[in-house]
Image (cartoon, coloured by chain):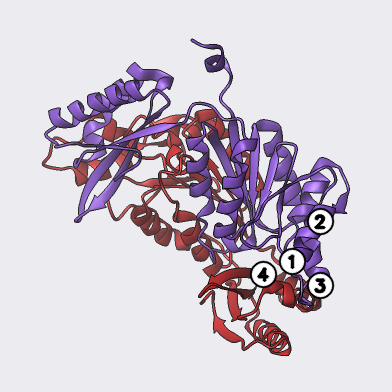
Chain colours: A purple, B red
Amino acid sequence: MSDTATEPTPTAAVLIIGNEILSGRTQDTNLSFIAKFLGGIGVRLREARVVPDVEAEIVAAINALRDRYTYVFTTGGIGPTHDDITAECVAKAFGVALIQNPEARRRLEDHYKGTDMLNAARLRMANTPEGATLIDNPVSSAPGFQIGNVFVMAGVPMIMQAMLRGLQNRLAGGAPVLARTVISGIPEGTLAEGLGAIQTAYGEAVDIGSYPFFRQGKISTSLVLRGTDAALLDKAAADVADLVRRNGGEPEVRDGYGG
Amino acid sequence: MSDTATEPTPTAAVLIIGNEILSGRTQDTNLSFIAKFLGGIGVRLREARVVPDVEAEIVAAINALRDRYTYVFTTGGIGPTHDDITAECVAKAFGVALIQNPEARRRLEDHYKGTDMLNAARLRMANTPEGATLIDNPVSSAPGFQIGNVFVMAGVPMIMQAMLRGLQNRLAGGAPVLARTVISGIPEGTLAEGLGAIQTAYGEAVDIGSYPFFRQGKISTSLVLRGTDAALLDKAAADVADLVRRNGGEPEVRDGYGG
């Protein structure tokens, strides 16, 4: 085993901030995007939380998560309106002042140049905790920011995705998480015993999940294998496919989460 | 103010259990469904967490949430496979034994009657913490369960939704949460100051959120007002619509989260 392989795998949590998620008004899609992005750079997403636009809740969640995980990614609450309080909350969580960040202000001035749109409300988007570094927003200029291990991003998916892509070189990852999917066509209860035995045989090197779904009114199962060793993953997927065949199914093995 | 109005509003948390959400493999849709259902019966969803299929994480989250909220709803991890460990974890969280629930077993026997499908793995779906009451599963028979203020449901959306609908008479709600949406057609930064003043004027009786979105490549804003008093909500929505008009927009006011 190489030296790098003994490094602990970096971990992460996502904190989704916003009443609109907890009211059901908005269907969050940021979590699955961030999850896949992190898997691709070898960071394991271990927890997510959704909290309302309430200062005490946001501060408590940031502090709970930043102590526990290598990285924390927040989404939402960095716009110009009264319900956008994430920057203040992150400053409180870190016990530092909220300041007007000169570079953030410059970017906003540049973006709104020639208009009278840069009012006091929009200028709030230049506020960051003292000591924060900016996260680029190539869509609408108002930046996110990083302080310590916390990365504060927009909630609008198009902007969040652009911010996250720009962060890649700031994140120390590990071996990318790879996946194989075996679609079984038969119910999971029939495979459960054999599947448990395969999981035991591979231990922590391969994580096997079983996900039932309905297809043409019939219950079917996707068996998803995840790990960082492609050859081991292929071997485990072949074992699962054999199990499906022994139970009368016709397995389809796919790369990734396909299916 | 009537006696019932002085009752504290019931609160809830959702605990989503499953590696498939944290890997990005599965896009969760249960949270928004539960959120809207709870809003309709006057229960305020205050927090959601997503945890992996890891016993210590599930137990800790259940205990943190059940102490804090009127109700906790869990999704996922109650199937027959090795990664389905929710029942064991809930029993540990409550410090009670995991037992084979006779009525749950009867339902499974009934469902699988005339087949040889009720193997040891599927019988695990009859296990509940001691003292739990069952939650009906009209789709595939394997029940969820309730213990204390914790309601344990399936992760498959079709089954979860059927379980939740069947729970309505067990939940003490409050006044339903109503919503109005004002679509502004102009960016939120332009409205922010006026919107903040309206929020301050209505205080906690009306919660106003501002959500930018892109339409035909142009940034627009949905202003969402929530509360339990329909007349007050209509008045606040009219104030917001006036604000939009004063800023040169043509507001559309809709019931609910429409738009």
Q: Residues within 10 Å of mark 3 (few under 14, many from 20)?
A: some
- Residue at the image point whose x is 52% and y is 69% from the top: B40
Q: Which residue is mark 1?
A: A80
Q: Looking at the picture, which amino acid does disc 3 mark?
A: Asn
Q: Amino acid at mark 4?
A: Gly
Between discs 2 and 3, the one toward the N terminus: 3
**Are the numbered discs 4 and 3 placed on the same chain, yes or no?**
no
Establish if A51 lies above or below A147.
below
Number of the label disc, if any, that sits on residue A38: none
Q: Nearer the viewer, mark 4 or mark 3?
A: 3
Both marks 2 and 3 on one chain:
yes
- At label 2, counting other C-alpha atoms closer than 10 Å, the crowd grade (few under 14, some 14-19, many 20 or more) is many
- The spot of residue A239 in percent (x, y) is 24, 24
State whether residue B237 is above or below residue A253. Answer: below
Q: How far is disc 4 from disc 3 in space, using C-alphas?
A: 19 Å
Circle 4 chain = B
Is any part of residue B1 visible from this angle? no
- Image point 45% across, 51% down: which residue? B28
